[in-house]
Amino acid sequence: MSIKKASSVSRRDFLKLAGTSVGGIVLAAAMPTVAQDVTPTATIPPTPLVDLLYLYPGTIQTDRLLVQDAMNEILRTRINATIRLNTIAYGDYEQRINLMNAAGEAYDLAFTASWINLYDINVSQGNFLAVDDLLQTVGRDVYASLPAGIWGAVRVGGQTYAVPNNNIMAFPGGFYVRKDHADNYGLDVTNINSYAETEAFLAAVKAGEGIAPIAANTDNPCGQLWSGPTGSDLVLGGPANAYTIMVDASGTVRSIAFDDAVFGNSVRLAHNWYLAGYYDTEIIPNEEEKALIRAGQKSIVYNVTTKPGAALEQKNDWGFDMYSHTIVPPTLTTGGVRATMTAIGANTISAEASMGYINEIHTNVELYNLLAKGIEGRHWVWDDQALKVIKFPDGVTAETSGYNPNSDWEFGDQFIAYYISPDQVGAWEETMRINSEAPVSAILGFSFNPEPVRTEIAQVQAVAGEVEVPLQRGMLDPETALPEFQANLRAAGIDTIVAEMQRQIDAWKQSGS
Amino acid sequence: MVHRKFMKILQSNKGLEDSSKTTSRGFWKDLRNTFPLWLMAAPGCILVFIFSYLPMVGIIIAFKNYKPNLGILGSDWVGFENFRFLFGTQSAWRITGNTLMMNTLFIISTLIVALTLAILLDEVRDSRRFTFYQAAIFFPYFISWIVVGYLVYALLSTDDGVINHLLSSVGHEPVRWYSEPKYWPLILTLVQLWKHGGFWSIVYLAGILGINPELFESAKIDGASRWKQITYITLPLLKPIILINILLSVGRIFNADFGLFFAVTRNSSLLYPTTDVIDTFVFRALNGSSDIGMAAAAGLYQAVVGFTLVFVSNWIVRRVDPEMSLF
Amino acid sequence: MALIIKRGNHQSNEKLRRDIIHLILTAYSVICVLPFLLVISGSFSSEAGIAKSGYTLVPSEFSTSAYSYILKDPTQIIKAYGVSLSVTIVGSLLGLLFMSMLAFVLSRPQFKYRKALSFYVFFTMFFNGGLVPWYILIVRYLHLKDTFLILFLPLLIIPWYVLILRTSFAQLPEELLEAARLDGASEWRIFHQIVVPLSTPVLATVGLFCVLTFWNDWWLALLFINNRDLVPLQYLLHEITVNINFMAANPQTTGITMPVLPVRMAMAVLAIGPIALIFPLVQRYFVRGITLGALK
């Protein structure tokens, strides 16, 4: 049993103790009958089962308890434990788990990433268990299943605090475009090497369809036309923030806002395109933009992840056949490795059982697909068993299915998932190839400590938020707006942040990680 | 003559009398008399203690670099460091100014509209119409700010909005509403009024209905017009409740209704010069960082200013008329 | 009510006045109700219809997809309605009772500590310790997580309403209450036999506000409820909303189809439903005060 904080004997613990002792009595009473009917196997647990609490974001599925029971049948025999799936609404996940951590509430497994339930913040707060030893024992299989080079990206202070879910980790960047528009308006997708080259296409679509072809969100992608150079890693801010601080292949830290060749050009281009009417006149909230997309009012979206199989996923989203084309080759970055991970809570009931679960969900095909796809026959049936393609049962659709979380990327090893369409076959192999072949970021494994510049970060975020989206979408005149933006960033303290980051990186390199 | 008569009745109907000077027996001696009162106040006071006073210890989080694993007491003390980000940018003055100005506009306009509605409603004799009006003006309150945002967009969208269609039909240039900050104080005030006017009018209506009808009877007999009745009876008797609402609103003057300023403006950053308020600024600044200390500092800043303003206002009110003050 | 018949002029002035009042009120009511009609119409539209034609009084493309999406799990919805109803009823009754008792005490002139107690109550409107200590108190020390109690306890006393009640009670004629006291009536009797019947409009108002507070709350469920059987309706709707926002903003979650705009409208409609039924009940109390003569 792992260490539990002495002060936190919670109500849950009490109930569990009460429950398991009752369970034990019931089991004991049931034993004689069972022993007579069935050859007792070593798998009937003589000790009380461990019940693991697993927190993760998602949409609440109607049939989740059925799925949970089916999973537990497997887990009981394999790791002598059961799991409780606690799905929390996406938008509430961060808030809830932050509060649970603040109050010292215990959980066993939780979803963590570089973008939600932030990994490094959790580690600095001591919320996660260090799992290096467990990965060599109970977690042997999952450790072997992940590419060896990525573990450096997960380590903080020399220790590993979560297990990445096997997924795409090096993200290629590019655009999606509607197949029908591309074919009709002469866009030869394979010959495009930069966003600027799609200009003729945009003009043609606007003239022919009378729509503003570029789809953009209020956050990411917001229509921005710049990308970090290959090999660069974003350390503060994201692909759609105008102040984003990045580290390039040589290890130099800078903020994109001051890179005129990349950022300045992208903003000027966006301005021309805005004046030409390729962007929406106004910034439209995401769900309305989605509605426009599905109603056929959009053609193309820039600065998206063009992983293998993306076109198919986007087809579900857009409702039209899509092309997906890569412009920026993928780099293996810390953020990419940490994009989806499972961590063990520091107050877990049983570290072995928790790691045992992680081990299973990464390697046990049946278990993983229960969690990701549901129960065979009820939520999916075979389309082509040899190729491992599944489909919905007759009469069931994506909307009416009782279990369709559509979040494979959150769990275990996505590469053991069944394909949902014949077009997807082969995507896993290709993704694994990308992961292993992509160049590695110069600062893989580095975690920025924001403490010394907390105030500056808050100020920069506030200031940048005022103009980021309009600026990157061309709604403002770059001649005046860009210098003003740069001045405001300076006043908010961006140079301090950059200097601090450079200092930390140099120190990290020195310590030879 | 009418005026004097009503003043007398009003005097006798006055509210709180300050009797703290009359007796000076001790707490325990008085207990036999006051015990039933304490008993009645008990559930409320206990609940307030548990859910509001006990957690107040957390106020010090605003001065600490709070880390959950260290707990409230164990986290480092950082003095006013957490407050810096609220003042460090040029936006600081703007957000403060916007918050104050917009809330002041809201207080005044809501008061006028709600009072007017309440007085008008009181004039309605037909109970079916009364029910209809009263329910109707309440409806906007139920619509969430996000949906209100959609509806406002349907009106103000540059290309498809109703308003711009109307403007073009009379030959006027369409206006880019979501890019021009200067219209938004008015727009937001109108939207706020629409949503809350009916809600507050009910409070004032309840106040009007509580007025002794005999007062109106005698006024009518004396030949006072309806308008005179309203100005000499209704409004003065509503003064306490009006004043209370104003005082409390002043206390909240530093807190903006986040949904209004975020969802209705669709968080269009071009409008920030007039629509960026403290709450939206803090949201943007602390987005993605779970910096509890800084969030607490922002909240404390708002609370202190609000409380100070109420305290001062209450003191002014007390000088004018002690019965009407908050405390 | 007998019309006071004066000169003919006065009568037509009266009529003009009445008409103007009705005109203003009707116009205002239309402005208030019309958007809601748009919302209802939007909830019965398809998403494409709204995207192409905007919000119209009659749906351009009729569809119940929004409702079928939300009501996908009817048992869950019914349970949630049940939870919301019970919380609202219990919470509003208790809240109204406790708050009016407290307000009554604060309004008694002979109660020496009323100013101090008023300050005690209203201070909390401005200062609170923040989310984290409050959460820790409730979860760690009061052990109220995942209980029915937590869905209404923290909302029972709302200082603003207490103040409205206090102000209203304080305006009741003091001679009346004094007379009762001299007759030997206890404070409790004065409260429920005199003050309450005389204050029905304001009690109805605060009662209505309480109902709205409890019915609309999803925050408490968000923080404290894991047990899906204890989830109130508004929280269910809230979950849908945040998922919409999240999925629209995050590329990983593509492929989950939801007619977003109509769903938002439908949620607004579902949220109001029961409240609209409360109104007729509350209307009864919005009557002119009982004349004092009758009481004496």
Image (cartoon, rainbow, N blue to C red):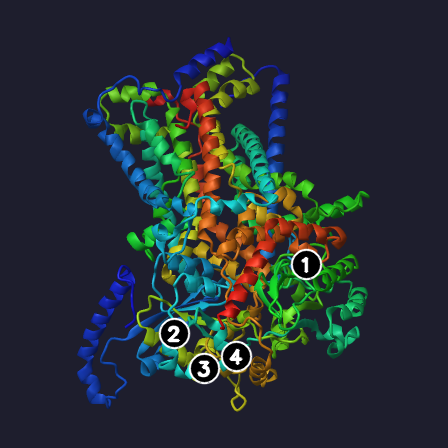
Residue A376 is labelled as 3
Are the residues flagged by discs 3 and 2 in contact, CB closer than 8 Å? no
Q: Residues within 10 Å of mark 2 (few under 14, many from 20)?
A: some
Marks 1 and 4 belong to one chain: yes
Q: Could you tell me which residue is drawn at 38 percent across and 60 percent down?
A: A101
From the viewer's perspective, is the residue at label 1 or at label 4 nearer? 1
- Figure check: B319 above or below B80: above
Q: Quadrant of residue C79?
A: bottom left
- Name the N-terminal-most of marks 4 and 3: 3
Are the residues flagged by discs 1 and 3 in contact, CB closer than 8 Å? no
Q: Amino acid at mark 4?
A: Phe
Alpha carbon of mark 3 to alpha carbon of mark 2: how far?
33 Å
Marks 1 and 3 belong to one chain: yes
In the structure shown, which secondary structural element does the residue marked by tag 4 occupy?
Answer: loop
Relative to residue A22, is residue C13 drawn left or right?
Answer: right
- Residue A251 in the image: state x and y as whole percent: 60, 69
Residue holding disc 4 = A392
